[in-house]
Image: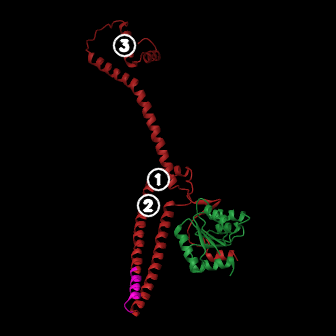
Chain colours: A red, B green
Amino acid sequence: MTKPFMAELQKARKSGHPFQALIEDGAAAAAVLPAPTQVVQADNTEVLRAVSDLGAKLDRFLAMDAAQIDQIQVEIADISGRIKATKVEMAAIRHPLAGDDKFQQASQELGAVVAATEAATNTIMACAEELEEVVSELKSSLPEGYHNDRVNDMVDVIVRIYEACNFQDLTGQRITKVVRAMSFIEERVDAMMGLWNKREFEAMPLPPSVTKKDENLDLHGPAEATPDSGNISQADIDALFG
Amino acid sequence: MKILVVDDYATMRRIVRNLLTQIGYTDIDEAGDGVSALAKLRESKFGLIISDWNMEPMTGLQLLKEIRADAKLAATPFIMVTAESKTENVIAAKQAGVNNYIVKPFNADTLKQKIQAVIGG
């Protein structure tokens, strides 16, 4: 070819079929060259056809895939946004720098629910057993008649108390199932976070506190009055009131 | 003496009412939150208020402050009965003018002692 290479490229780009234009230009340039002194007989039809097909494919690729590349870029940006949002949600559940562990806190609260209902149920049962003893004594000391029938009614009531106390066993089992499910979720969240760099999560905003507030005071609800819990006993409260 | 029991949990109001009856107080009224408690206090005279803290829309602390800020109600004895036992919460309630403070769970003896300490007798 007789023209500079960049000029050829610019012309080819303007035509909209860059590769085909280059081939045509090459053919035109070849036409003005002096004839070779020695004629070489060779059939290059197949080669030229293959090159032409390749050029046509390249033209189609350059013209058609620009829109597809734009679409892919949009989709990648969308996926990137969704990954970032997912990370923010994961950090909200289990932020590495958060002071409180929501899973552990919830498990402890549920454990306390089970313990408290168990203690209350035991007290109810003990009281009902005492009543049963009293009723039994009364029944044996009374003659047949109205009063004896009423004592029997009391026995029926005590049986209903016993039956109602079954709730503790059922709720205890249900809460244990919830604790297990939470433990499973906690493990999965930890595994998901383990796939990413921990420092990424540290840089994310801390989740808002779920503790209820009244003015600037936290309302924690029921808690044990242990020395390091910040809670005080009724005796300490009494001392404050003199 | 008429007593106003304020708690958003109806079962708790029932427990307090039953305990008060057991220890000899039978003139009892109930309110489910601070706002309705204030309305009742402005309607008729009460000798004692026994209130929970954690309620909506007006908390027990806010109710206490409203009462202490109201010249007609300011002198009414107020006992807080709550699960909140953080030192700063108790101190805040004391600074707001609570007469006594009972942490849940409690029994009839504790309630009786605190009432007697507040109203005398």
Residue at 39% x, 76% y is A163
For the residue carrying disc 1, how many other residues have a C-alpha within 10 Å: few (<14), some (14-19), or many (20+)? some
**Residue B34 location, quadrant:** bottom right
Is residue A134 visible in this depiction of the protein?
yes
Mark 3 and mark 1: Cα distance apart in space: 58 Å
In the rendering, which numbered label is found on residue A193?
1
For the residue carrying disc 2, how many other residues have a C-alpha within 10 Å: few (<14), some (14-19), or many (20+)? some
Give the prevailing secondary structure in the magenta stretch: helix
- The local secondary structure at tag 1 comes to helix
Residue at 52% x, 69% y is B11
Q: Earlier in the sequence, mark 2 or mark 1?
A: 2
Q: Amino acid at mark 1?
A: Met
Q: Nearer the viewer, residue A176 or A40?
A: A176
- The local secondary structure at tag 3 comes to helix
The answer to whether B50 appears left or right of A108 in the picture is right
Q: Amino acid at mark 3?
A: Glu
Residue at 72% x, 63% y is B70
Bounds of the magenta span? A143-156
- Give the percent coordinates (x, y) of residue A229: 59, 69
**Front label number (3 vs 1):** 1
Residue bearing the label numbered 3: A24
- Give the percent coordinates (x, y) of residue A184: 41, 60
